[in-house]
Image: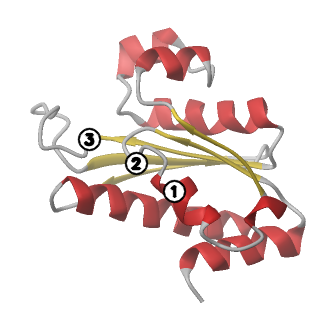
Amino acid sequence: MTLPSRVGKALRDQGLKLALAESLTGGLVAAMVTEVPGSSDYFLLGVAAYSNRSKVEVLGVSESTLRSHGAVSAECAREMASGVRRASGADIGASCTGIAGPGGATATKPVGLVYLGVDDGRRALVEERRFEGDRSQVRRAAAERLLELILLDLEP
């Protein structure tokens, strides 16, 4: 069974709904989730919030978070996940933000740096990862890891 199918089965079995807020993956996770037939049973919303403005206006990320920590940060990933969960009415909100490259990196935020967030209303999990490879490989690795984190959150 594929990873998106496993996520879908767990959501369906528990009667839960999912919403996604994606930055560096630009909708890749939503595309993977909706490849599964019947995903409309558990998938409510996918937002590709690429700009800081969309993170603030659509997801409710605090401007002070962006000023203090930047869009590529644990704090931003946490606020994106909780924001999409609240905005959609989903049980689980998940997010990813990072630097896929080849540009955009700094000395403290290299290409491949990714923050992933999952918020289920009771707790918020944020993970920092560093993925190797080109833009496509970083985006794919981030998408797959976010699905794994969603599964971890769904386990009893």
Image location of residue 50, percent across then percent down: 42, 30
Residue shown at the point (9%, 33%) measured from the top left: 107
User: Is any atom of residue 71 visible in this view?
Assistant: yes
Quadrant for the C terminus, please.
bottom right
Per the image, the residue denoted by label 3 is 99
Q: Alpha-carbon distance for marks 1 and 3?
A: 16 Å
Furthest toward the right, the residue is: 15
Front residue of 9 and 41: 41
Mark 1 surroundings: few (<14), some (14-19) or many (≥20) residues within 10 A: many
Q: In this view, does 108 lie to the left or right of 127?
A: left
Q: Is residue 23 above or below residue 60?
A: below
Residue 15 numbered tag: none
Do callouts 2 and 1 mark residues in contact (Cβ within 8 Å)?
yes
SS at mark 2?
loop
SS at mark 3?
loop
Residue 29 numbered tag: 1
What amino acid is at disc 2?
Thr
